[in-house]
Image (cartoon, rainbow, N blue to C red):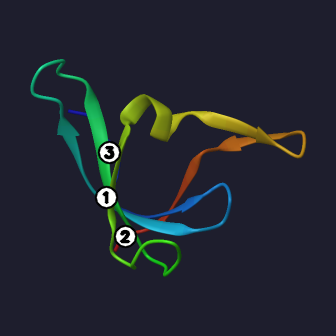
Amino acid sequence: MSGIKKGIYEHFKGKRYEVIDVVRHSETQEEYVLYKALYCGQYPEGTLWVRPLSMFLETVVRDGIEKPRFKYLSTS
């Protein structure tokens, strides 16, 4: 399994999430990041989300600046 740190991450759009763990798809064996929202919005605070590990770790370009999609901030 991946060595991604559990803890608090900030999405490049500014919202914060807590990474709970890395999980594996039962059929494809692909790794996914299981995380929860730490804000209230369209969905309740604490809503769980899953995203492919490769996508979670990738970089994005915003306003001409390349940055991580999720930036590690601290332990939970």
Q: Quadrant of the C terminus?
A: bottom left
- Distance from label 2 to label 1 (Cα)? 7 Å
Residue 4 spot, x, y in % from top left: 34, 44
Q: Give the residue type at disc 3.
A: Val
Q: Residue furthest front?
A: 42
Residue at 56% in and 33% down: 58
Q: Quadrant of residue 12?
A: bottom right
Q: Residues within 10 Å of mark 3 (few under 14, many from 20)?
A: many
In primary-sequence order, the first of circles 1 and 3 is 1
**Which residue position holds label 1?**
6
Q: Earlier in the sequence, mark 2 or mark 1?
A: 1
Can you tell which quarter of the image residue 15 is in?
A: bottom right
Q: Is mark 2 in CB contact (under 8 Å) with mark 1?
A: yes
Name the residue tied to disc 2: 75
Measured from the top left, where is residue 64 in percent x and y?
90, 39
**Residue with the mark numbered 3:** 33
State the residue lying farthest toward the left. 26
The answer for how far apart the CA atoms under marks 1 and 3 are is 10 Å
